[in-house]
Amino acid sequence: MKELKLFTPAKLGSIELSNHIVMAPMTRCRAIGNIPNDLMAEYYRQRAGAGLIVTEGTSPSPNGLGYCRIPGIYSEAQVEGWKKVTSAVHQAGGKIFMQLMHTGRISHRLNMPEGARVLAPSAIQPKGQMWTDASQMQDFPVPEAMTAADVRDAIQEFVVAARNAIAAGFDGVEVHGANGYLQEQFLSPSSNQRDDLYGGSVANRCRFVVETVEGIAAAIGKDRTGIRLSPYSIAGDLSAYPEIAATYDHLSAELNRIGIAYIHLVDHSAQGSPEVPVAMKQKVRDNFQNTIIHCGNFNLERANAAIAPGALADLVAFGRPFLNNPDLVNRLENDYPLATELDRNILFSADEKGYTDFAVYAA
């Protein structure tokens, strides 16, 4: 057994974690009717060896349901469904945060209930397509530019969703401010061309994210609130821009002022995005006093180095290795081989295949 910091207990705000490993949020599309179910409870239970699980992106409103079969947290049925998940994880000794994700313009009406709207900071159509169960691949539509009332409503939807998550038994929530979804759409000038308080300057483009986080922290407690950020990500048809360093400098300082539990910083360079510069990671570390999670194609050695004394992170998140290694923490700690076979064609299907049917390692 390796004597590495990665496998020792950690603290996240007031929460005790069994180790320094986070299971990163990963959309899996098993929520039939957008309601969490027994299959999802089993999936998360199997992976409760992580010190912290962050769930797949979960919509705070019908407007945020951009993908097929993703869960929500705005109805009583959804709260009851999520209780199965949190109960299973807690009984297995784990901790779990819900990731709140509004897809914004990365959406399609065929994936949404009647009356829902595809909203974004500005009416700018993203390039690319999205899968729909009804008509397979479809172009992204032109979104509706959010009015001032729409912005206020969306912030309130996040706050109510956070309260619902706590009612469902979650240990906290993570705002999805990454991957080209609504929060990051406000941050980026390529998707935000507003001329009101939520567009233009760096501070204005950060305002929607800051006010959302402030509202959630006030509602459920700042020690139960985190956020995921992905500087330089090209997901959602976004791209780097001249003010990107200033944007994340300002935003991380504001998040520190609010005093939330953590910033979850993801580097998507392994998937084709530009690498997040060390200088930006250092700036976030300098600005933010609480926990920082790093995510981005880690293996055991790099993960342990990332949280060494004087390093820039406190916890390390693993994503894809958890897909086919539900006992990932045990395998890493004991030098057991990792499963590598994975059929990517069924990652986002509707049943247990490629989801809960992976075996734990038998020594």
Image (tube, rainbow, N blue to C red):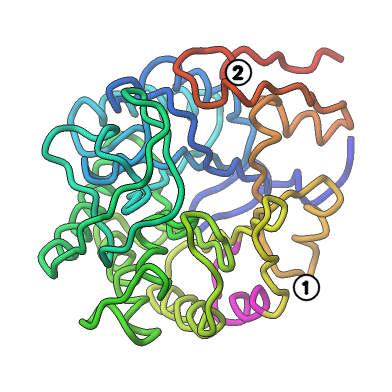
Q: Mostly what secondary structure, the magenta segment?
A: helix
Say which residue label 2 marks: 354
Q: Residue at x 14, y 58 (%)?
A: 153
- Is residue 322 shown above or below 60? above
Distance Cα–Cα, label 1 vs label 2: 39 Å
Q: Position of residue 72 (x, y in %)?
A: 29, 36
Q: Position of residue 174 (x, y in %)?
A: 43, 52
| Marks 1, 2: nearer the viewer | 2
- Is residue 167 shown above or below 218? above
Local secondary structure at mark 2: loop
In the picture, which quadrant includes the C terminus?
top right
Q: Residue at x 44, y 54 (%)?
A: 127
Question: Which residues are the magenta region?
Answer: 280-292
Badge 2, how many Cα within 10 Å: few under 14, some, many 20+?
some
First in residue order: circle 1 vs circle 2: 1
Position of residue 291 in the picture relative to residue 108 (left or right): right
Q: Position of residue 228 (x, y in %)?
A: 49, 58
Mark number displayed over residue 310: 1
Q: Amino acid at mark 2?
A: Gly
Q: Position of residue 292 (x, y in %)?
A: 60, 64
Local secondary structure at mark 1: loop
Position of residue 326 in the picture relative to residue 125 (left or right): right
**What is the number of callouts on the image?**
2
**Which of 241/229 is in front?**
241
Q: Residue at x 76, y 49 (%)?
A: 298
